[in-house]
Image (cartoon, helix red, strand yellow):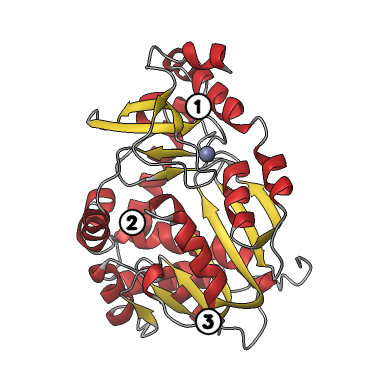
């Protein structure tokens, strides 16, 4: 491992982090990034004991909460409210998520969507006759869900602020965990608010993905980076068994289905998952060079797909005057979904 670390991109090897690893408690890290995707200073480190990656030093909790309450959507979507093309794109994503959700859903279940955004997923489910609750820290997006989409069950709230025990049967949490300042607290929180055998449907980005150029991986919004091993180990440590893990083709996002367990998962099961993982993650980052990236088909296929997507979105949305009409139109194209009872976990 030392040999591997010392050859990583000329970045200083083996140093100490300002905070210990949230997953294994180690304080020994390798710096794996010193700039964000815009070229601004941002240090990301990898725990050499388990492979978890995080932003170090960490902004204060107060600044993080402020960022997600007001700046995040503007910074990443360029608007306080979803633009027409986002309505189109997010509805398609919501339909994909709904297809994944339906096999786990049973009538009467209490469902919470964490990071509900502008509410497209909750809206698609409502059109399918399923009412869920949602929480979204950004006031403008939560307000859009309530006023434009009529979703009175979307609250402006953080996961850490939910009180009570066993209030939900199913939690959906997509592209949220990488943004959370305390993933341990959040995992424990989900365990607490779920009832017995409650399930979590989760998606997170994968540090092993290579569809971004090496200098475009890290950005200020992602406080943690996971790979399939670290996110599973984290879930297990906080009392979840892993029912399913899938890697999305192309993006390599990690899809998980977790189940609340009443027993403590043995430490050796968790350690077995993490064995050799740090070297594996580091080796992948080391191999992902600019030269290799630009000599592969990835950036060119990605550029072509993006252009085709923009053009399709523009063409589809140009005759609509509001977001909800776009959502309804996209939804109506998929209203004959077959029942998905064949897939049960
Ligand atoms: Zn660690």
Q: Is residue 311 above or below residue 338?
A: above
Position of residue 135 in the picture relative to residue 278 (left or right): left
Question: Which of 117 and 264 lies nearest the eye of the viewer?
Answer: 264
Q: Do the numbered discs 2 and 1 sit on residues whose CB atoms are within 8 Å?
A: no
Q: Is residue 299 above or below residue 264?
A: above
For label 3, the residue is: 165
Q: Is residue 173 above or below residue 102?
A: above
For label 2, the residue is: 85
Q: Residues within 10 Å of mark 3 (few under 14, many from 20)?
A: few
Answer with the quarter of the image where residue 329 lies: bottom left
Front of the two marks 2 and 3: 3
Query: Of label 2 and label 3, which has the lower sequence position?
Result: 2
The residue under the point 28% across, 52% down is 77
Question: Which of 68 and 241 lies nearest the eye of the viewer?
Answer: 241
Q: Quadrant of the C terminus?
A: bottom right
Query: Of label 3 and label 1, which has the lower sequence position?
Result: 3
Residue 321 can be seen, yes or no: no
Helix, strand or loop for disc 1 = helix
For label 1, the residue is: 298
Q: Quadrant of the N terminus?
A: top right
Answer with the quarter of the image where residue 223 lies: top left
- Cα distance between the residues tagged 2 and 1: 24 Å
Q: Position of residue 325 (x, y in %)?
A: 35, 73
Q: Position of residue 25 (x, y in %)?
A: 50, 43
Front of the two marks 3 and 1: 3
Query: Of label 2 and label 1, which has the lower sequence position?
Result: 2
């Amino acid at each position: 491992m030392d040999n591997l670390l010392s050859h990583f991109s000329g970045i200083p090897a083996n140093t100490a982090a300002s905070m210990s690893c949230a997953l294994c408690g180690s304080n020994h890290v390798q710096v794996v990034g010193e700039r964000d995707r815009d070229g601004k200073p941002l240090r990301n480190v990898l725990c050499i004991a388990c492979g978890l990656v995080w932003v170090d030093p960490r902004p204060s909790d107060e600044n993080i909460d402020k960022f997600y309450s007001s700046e995040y959507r503007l910074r990443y979507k360029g608007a306080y409210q979803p633009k027409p093309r986002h309505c189109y794109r997010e509805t398609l994503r919501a339909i994909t998520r709904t297809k994944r959700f339906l096999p786990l859903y049973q009538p009467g279940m209490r469902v919470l969507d964490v990071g509900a955004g502008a509410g497209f997923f909750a809206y698609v489910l409502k059109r399918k006759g399923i009412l869920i609750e949602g929480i979204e820290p950004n006031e403008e997006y939560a307000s859009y869900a309530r006023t434009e989409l009529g979703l009175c069950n979307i609250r402006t709230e953080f996961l850490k602020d939910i009180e009570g025990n066993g209030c939900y049967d199913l939690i959906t949490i997509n592209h949220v965990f990488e943004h959370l300042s305390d993933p341990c607290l959040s995992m424990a929180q989900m365990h607490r608010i779920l009832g017995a055998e409650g399930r979590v449907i989760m998606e997170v980005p994968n540090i092993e993905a290579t569809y971004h150029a090496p200098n475009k991986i890290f950005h200020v919004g992602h406080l943690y980076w996971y790979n399939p091993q670290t996110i599973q180990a984290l879930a297990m440590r906080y009392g979840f068994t892993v029912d399913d893990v899938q890697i999305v083709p192309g993006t390599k996002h990690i899809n998980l289905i977790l189940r609340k367990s009443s027993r403590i998962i043995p430490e050796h099961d968790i350690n077995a998952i993490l064995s050799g993982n740090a070297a594996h993650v580091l080796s992948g980052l080391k191999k992902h060079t600019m030269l290799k990236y630009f000599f592969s088909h990835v950036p060119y296929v990605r550029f072509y797909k993006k252009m085709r997507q923009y053009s399709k979105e523009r063409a589809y949305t140009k005759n609509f005057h509001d977001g909800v009409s776009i959502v309804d139109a996209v939804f109506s194209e998929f209203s004959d979904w077959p029942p998905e009872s064949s897939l049960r976990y």
